[in-house]
Image: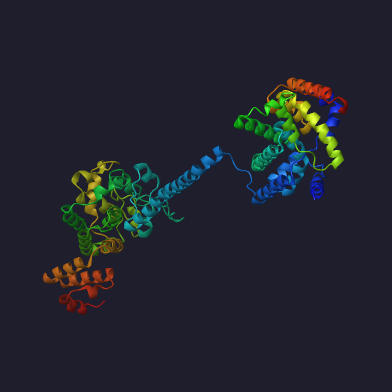
């Protein structure tokens, strides 16, 4: 940059400074200073350029909408998970459908209570230290040869890969036969175990099915009482991966295992009862399961019954009481009334006039 | 009264340590006193720059007020990338150009015509200093008339470059940047302007 001193003329500058002293009028000064002070008091600050302000106007609602959308998606993703799980737990025990390898690797604890059996398969209760949880197919530690004998019956339990729910829901035509077969088999423990699986797999919504099961359990109760302590079920149904957990107390008994091995053919179709046919994944074996579900232990029956009664409407109870009374089955009517009372606290108030006299005679 | 007003305004120029740019930033931040000092520093030179261009005190004051109001409004966008003097004189320069364009008058341009009676009348209409004593004012008024007459002889680019140089104190580079001319061109214009004024002023210089 050139220095202006080389250009300047001192004489001209001096003459200029001496002569040129004009200044704006005080009114102009006052006006400008007043405007400046007003502006400083107003503090309009730095205004962003128009191109920066323009996008801001539409960017804010867009960002708010995006935020709301993200939150909504997150809530939608989390809410179903929270609502579905309680439904599964309250409805029926979770359907454990492990693959055959999973069933073999993680056998359910034998002495687990029925309530724990309803827990998700992801968190099975740890077996007691002293009691190694034998797989359902393991009858006894000292029964090596017996294990061999019970192998055919065990195999279906280790092959739960077959469609579980469909096989466990017996058709109405199968139920009487199943009850008959189980009664004829005489082994109540194994059906009780199988019934646990059935109770888990089949949501007991059907009141008829529940009622029939109750009847069947009442019929099989003596047999169950006789065999519960001595019977061991080494062969749960194929579609019930946790039968052993539901068993009251599996005691190793070679005779019982032998009975189980013998009883299975009687309940199952002849092809399913053959020892060599119990290979995993065979679809024939699970078909025998519904027939094994009818006789049951009392605890298992009670749990299934409660599940069935929970959804039974009062009208059904009333109709059943009437039917039994008309059939002369007063004991059955009394049982039905007691079930009605257990299910509905205001059962007596719901009864019609003609049944109130009967209900008054039945103690609570 | 006028002297009191002027003395108070001159007092605002007292703090020299603070740069123009810092004052303008302070004013943009809300310090009104910073503007007072800034205004006191540049009011005279800026006014004379405008007055020498338009040759009319009323019009010069009008443009002068416009320039400062523009500066007040633009305080938020002011960035000290250049000298404040460059910024404010650029506003003034642009305001004059706008005035010429909007008025469409070439009469002001005719002030370059030496011996033109109308231009002389314009020069005579320029108000004198308001602070001088009467006898001094008469003398300086005569000197100013001669300077104005000599200035009027300059071509507008030379006059503009000379006025910017002598009133604003801007460097040749700043003037070149303001006017869009090369620095050497500006230097030549200023040099020619000085030479012509010196020869025109004669015994005054």
Seen from this angle, which residue lies furthest left?
A327
The relative height of residue A322 versus residue B80 in the rendered view (above or below) is below
Q: Position of residue A213 (x, y in %)?
A: 22, 60
Asked if B143 appears above or below A284 in the picture, the reply is above
**What residue sits 15% from the left and 70% below the top?**
A322
| Residue A138 x %, y % | 35, 49
Residue B182 falls in image quadrant: top right
Where residue B76 sits, quadrant-wise, is top right
User: Which residue shows up at 83% across the image and 39% down it?
Assistant: B137
Kindly tell me whether residue A251 is visible in this rendering: no
| Residue in the foreground of this view, choosing between A150 and A218 | A218
**Of A155 and A360, which appears nearest the observer?**
A360
Rendering coords of residue A313 (x, y %): 23, 65
Residue A140 is left or right of residue B4, and the answer is left
Q: Look at the picture and state if A108 lies above or below A334.
A: above
Instruction: Determine if residue A102 is in view.
Output: yes
Picture mark count = 0
Describe residue A177's horizontal placement relative to residue B47 as left or right: left
The way the protein has been coloured in the rendering is rainbow
Q: Is residue B48 left or right of residue A241?
A: right
Q: In the image, is residue A253 above or below residue B134?
A: below
| Quadrant location of the C terminus of chain B in the rendered image | top right
Using the rendered view, name the quadrant where residue A251 is placed.
Answer: bottom left
Left or right: A276, with B173 as reference point: left
- Residue ranking furthest to the front: B117
In this view, the residue in front, B148 or B29, is B148
* Residue A181: image location, x then y, percent: 18, 55
């Amino acid at each position: 940059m050139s220095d202006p001193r080389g250009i300047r003329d001192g004489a001209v500058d001096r003459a200029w400074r001496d002569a040129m002293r004009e200044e704006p009028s005080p009114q102009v000064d006052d006006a400008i200073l007043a405007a400046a002070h007003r502006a400083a008091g107003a503090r309009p600050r730095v205004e962003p350029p128009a191109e920066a302000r323009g996008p801001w106007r539409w960017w804010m609602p867009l960002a708010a909408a995006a935020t709301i959308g993200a939150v909504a998606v997150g809530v939608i993703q989390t809410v179903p998970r929270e609502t579905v799980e309680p439904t599964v737990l309250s409805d029926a025990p979770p359907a454990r459908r492990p693959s055959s390898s999973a069933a073999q690797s993680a056998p359910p604890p034998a002495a687990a209570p029925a309530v724990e059996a309803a827990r998700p398969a992801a968190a099975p209760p740890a077996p007691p230290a002293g009691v190694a949880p034998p797989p359902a197919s393991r009858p006894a530690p000292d029964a090596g040869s017996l294990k061999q004998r019970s192998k055919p019956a065990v195999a279906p339990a280790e092959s739960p890969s077959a469609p579980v729910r469909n096989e466990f829901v017996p058709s109405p035509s199968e139920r009487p036969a199943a009850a008959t077969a189980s009664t004829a088999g005489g082994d109540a423990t194994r059906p009780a175990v199988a019934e646990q699986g059935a109770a888990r797999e089949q949501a007991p919504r059907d009141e008829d099915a529940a009622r029939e099961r109750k009847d069947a359990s009442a019929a099989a109760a003596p047999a169950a009482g006789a065999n519960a302590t001595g019977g061991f079920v080494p062969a749960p149904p194929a579609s019930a991966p946790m039968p052993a957990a539901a068993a009251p107390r599996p005691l190793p008994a070679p005779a019982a295992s032998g009975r189980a091995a013998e009883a299975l053919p009687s309940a199952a179709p002849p092809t399913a009862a053959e020892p060599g046919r119990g290979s995993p994944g065979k679809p024939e074996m699970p078909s025998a399961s519904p027939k094994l579900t009818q006789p049951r232990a009392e605890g298992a029956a009670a749990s299934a019954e409660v599940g069935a009664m929970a959804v039974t409407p009062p009208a059904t109870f009333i109709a059943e009481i009437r039917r039994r009374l008309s059939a002369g089955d007063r004991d059955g009517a009394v049982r039905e009334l007691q079930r009605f009372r257990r299910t509905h606290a205001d059962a007596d108030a719901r009864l019609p006039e003609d049944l109130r006299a009967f209900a008054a005679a039945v103690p609570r | 009264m006028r002297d009191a007003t002027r003395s108070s305004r001159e007092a605002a120029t007292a703090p020299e340590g603070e740069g123009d740019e810092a004052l303008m930033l302070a004013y943009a931040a809300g310090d009104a006193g910073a503007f007072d000092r800034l205004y006191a520093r540049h009011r005279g030179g800026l006014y004379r720059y405008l007055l020498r261009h338009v040759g009319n005190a009323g019009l010069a004051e009008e443009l002068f007020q416009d320039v400062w109001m523009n500066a007040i409004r633009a305080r938020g966008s002011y960035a000290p990338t250049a000298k404040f003097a460059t910024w404010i004189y650029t506003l003034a320069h642009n305001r004059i150009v706008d005035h010429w364009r909007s008025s469409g008058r070439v009469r002001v341009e005719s002030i370059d015509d030496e011996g033109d009676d109308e231009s002389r009348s314009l020069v005579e209409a320029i108000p004198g200093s308001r602070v001088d004593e009467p006898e001094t004012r008469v003398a300086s008024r005569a000197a100013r008339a001669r300077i104005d007459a000599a200035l009027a002889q300059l071509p507008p680019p030379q006059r503009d470059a000379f006025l910017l140089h002598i009133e604003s104190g801007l460097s040749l580079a700043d003037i070149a940047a303001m006017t869009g001319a090369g620095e050497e061109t500006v230097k030549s214009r200023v040099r020619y302007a000085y030479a012509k004024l010196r020869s025109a002023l004669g015994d005054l210089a």
